[in-house]
Image (tube, rainbow, N blue to C red):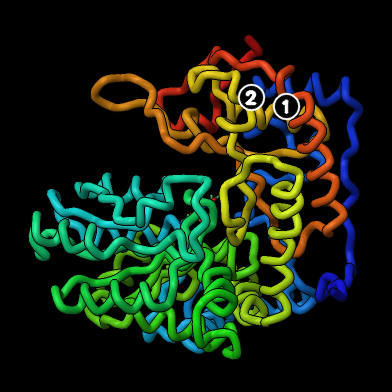
């Protein structure tokens, strides 16, 4: 098989820090063994998140200078609005400062206290906004998604029977919308099939329930449909994406991922009444409906990024790079969430460190050990991230105890991925020497950001 390479060449470079083992050790101790608290200047390869970490193209950098910074009626907004309409197909668009800005407005307008919002697994900020507005989140993802070892081509799919049961139990009038994430971040970047999206939409239409997409990584989802679903292989990513979005009534979007920019987001819909009411709240929380928390130059960059992201070569390389990392780990026998998803490879810390109990924070310990070994920064997605039960005060104990290796878009080469593989394989060979952690400082909310640990 002939090899392929990055579908871009490098015009500007950023020098990476390469600290010694002793320096990394000191940095890790200063950060309380929490990768969120490590200074970025001390990180070699930063796989903390794919959010806002994208490298922009020369076209985007060039467009920054043309940003129209008028307070009202910015030309740059018109370009962004047109890009969203052209590529995603929604009629009405409102800008927000990032994804959670759109989530805030949508949740406030659609949710009444006592409502239920079904979703295919939760995302932290999305669920927080639903709950703050008085809704109960109900997980309707297929069971397979909660098991890291099960191979399923569309592990993000909705279990229609679970959705139907909820409708029967609470009544459609208590369900303001279904929140459908494409792809599903916390399940491992797993996609939803076109067929499933269509079925969810049809079921919801029958009951007069809206489908609102969390479109954050929708282009990655489109790629998996092209690759895995019957009859889709010869279609363009752009065509698949537009059909996907047609099975929904609107979306919230974090532009920091699949719109290939460092900041920004939007809320889109086809219902004019919802649009008018949302526009009022954009003014309250975000800014004028012609900028919504973004500078004119940010909107220029996003308008271009939206179009660049549906380039078939770009997205094939993007998913290919995540797979380049993941497949090598699988081949080396490292336990990871399968199949490899769209934006990240997730290490299964329970299987990696079977000698640690969940109270010894295996995923946190593994993330710390990886940084110490090679300066690679990852993110804990396990018991620390899951927080405590509000009523009992006990740790929430999630099934999945994961370390997320999240690949920024267009930033690293496959050589960087190989360095990550070597470090993880070495760590796996000496995994018995990795000890657990104890939590020395625990913040009351969203503890994973600021918690501090030390080795047991
Ligand atoms: N939805 C999903 C699925 C996300 O992954 C994120 C952010 C958001 C919504 C919120 O968007 O950050 O623009 O306000 N995920 C980042 C991550 C933070 O690291 O996974 P935002």
- Quarter of the C terminus within the rendering: top right
- Alpha carbon distance from label 2 to label 1: 6 Å
- Front residue of this view, candidates 350 and 128: 350
Q: Find residue 385 and report its horizontal and vertical position in percent.
A: 48, 34
Task: Quadrant for residue 396, please give it.
Answer: top left
- Tell me the residue at 20%/47% (across/down): 134
Residue 212 in sight in this render: yes
Indicate whether 90 appears above or below 279.
below
Q: Find residue 97 and report its horizontal and vertical position in percent.
A: 50, 60
- Tell me the residue at 17%/63% (across/down): 164
Task: Quadrant for residue 189, please give it.
Answer: bottom right
User: Which residue position holds label 1?
Assistant: 369
Residue 64 in sight in this render: no
Disc 1 residue crowd, few under 14, some 14–19, many 20+, Cα 10 Å: many
Indicate whether 272 appears above or below 174.
below
Q: Find residue 1 and report its horizontal and vertical position in percent.
A: 84, 74
Q: Are marks 2 and 1 in contact (CB under 8 Å)?
A: yes
Q: Secondary structure at mark 1?
A: helix
- Tell me the residue at 50%/82% (across/down): 230
Q: Is mark 1 within 8 Å of ligand 1?
A: no
- Front residue of this view, candidates 48 and 352: 352
User: Which residue position holds label 2?
Assistant: 365
């Amino acid at each position: 098989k002939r090899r392929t390479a990055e579908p871009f060449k490098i015009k500007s470079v950023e020098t990476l820090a390469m600290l010694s083992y002793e320096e990394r050790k000191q940095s890790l101790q200063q950060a309380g063994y929490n990768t969120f608290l490590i200074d970025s200047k001390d990180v070699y390869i930063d796989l903390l998140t794919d959010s806002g970490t994208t490298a922009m193209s020369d076209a985007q950098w060039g467009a920054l200078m043309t940003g129209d910074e008028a307070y009202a009626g910015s030309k740059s907004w018109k370009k962004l609005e047109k890009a969203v309409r052209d590529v995603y197909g929604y009629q009405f668009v409102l800008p927000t400062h990032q994804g959670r800005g759109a989530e805030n407005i949508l949740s406030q307008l659609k949710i009444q206290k006592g409502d239920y919002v079904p979703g295919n697994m939760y995302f932290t900020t999305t669920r927080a906004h639903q709950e703050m507005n008085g809704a109960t989140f109900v997980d309707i993802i297929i069971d397979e998604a909660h098991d890291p070892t099960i191979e399923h081509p569309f592990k993000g799919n909705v279990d229609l029977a679970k959705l139907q049961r909820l409708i029967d139990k609470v009544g459609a009038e208590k369900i303001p919308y279904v929140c459908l994430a494409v792809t599903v971040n916390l399940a491992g970047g797993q996609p939803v099939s076109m067929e499933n999206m269509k079925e969810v939409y049809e079921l919801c239409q029958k009951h007069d329930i809206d489908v609102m997409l969390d479109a954050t990584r929708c282009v990655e989802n489109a790629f998996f449909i092209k690759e895995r679903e019957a009859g889709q292989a010869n279609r363009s990513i752009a065509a698949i994406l537009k059909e996907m979005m047609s099975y929904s009534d609107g979306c919230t979007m974090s532009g920091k991922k699949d719109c290939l920019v460092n900041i920004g987001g939007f809320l889109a819909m086809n219902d004019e009444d919802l649009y008018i009411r949302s526009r009022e709240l954009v003014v309250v929380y975000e800014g004028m409906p012609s900028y919504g928390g973004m500078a004119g130059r940010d909107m220029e960059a996003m308008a271009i990024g939206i179009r660049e992201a549906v380039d078939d070569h770009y997205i094939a390389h993007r998913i290919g790079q995540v797979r380049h990392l993941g497949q090598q780990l699988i081949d080396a026998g490292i336990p990871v969430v399968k199949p490899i998803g769209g934006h990240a490879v997730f290490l299964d810390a329970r299987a990696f460190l079977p000698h640690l109990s969940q109270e010894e924070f295996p995923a946190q310990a593994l993330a710390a050990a990886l940084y110490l070994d090679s300066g690679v920064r990852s993110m804990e997605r396990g018991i620390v991230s899951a927080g405590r039960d509000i009523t009992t005060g006990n740790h929430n104990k999630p099934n999945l105890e994961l370390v997320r290796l999240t690949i920024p878009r267009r930033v690293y080469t496959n050589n960087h991925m190989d360095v990550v593989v070597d470090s993880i394989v070495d760590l796996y060979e000496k995994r018995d020497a990795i000890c657990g952690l104890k939590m020395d400082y625990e913040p009351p909310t969203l503890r994973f950001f600021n918690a501090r640990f030390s080795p047991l």
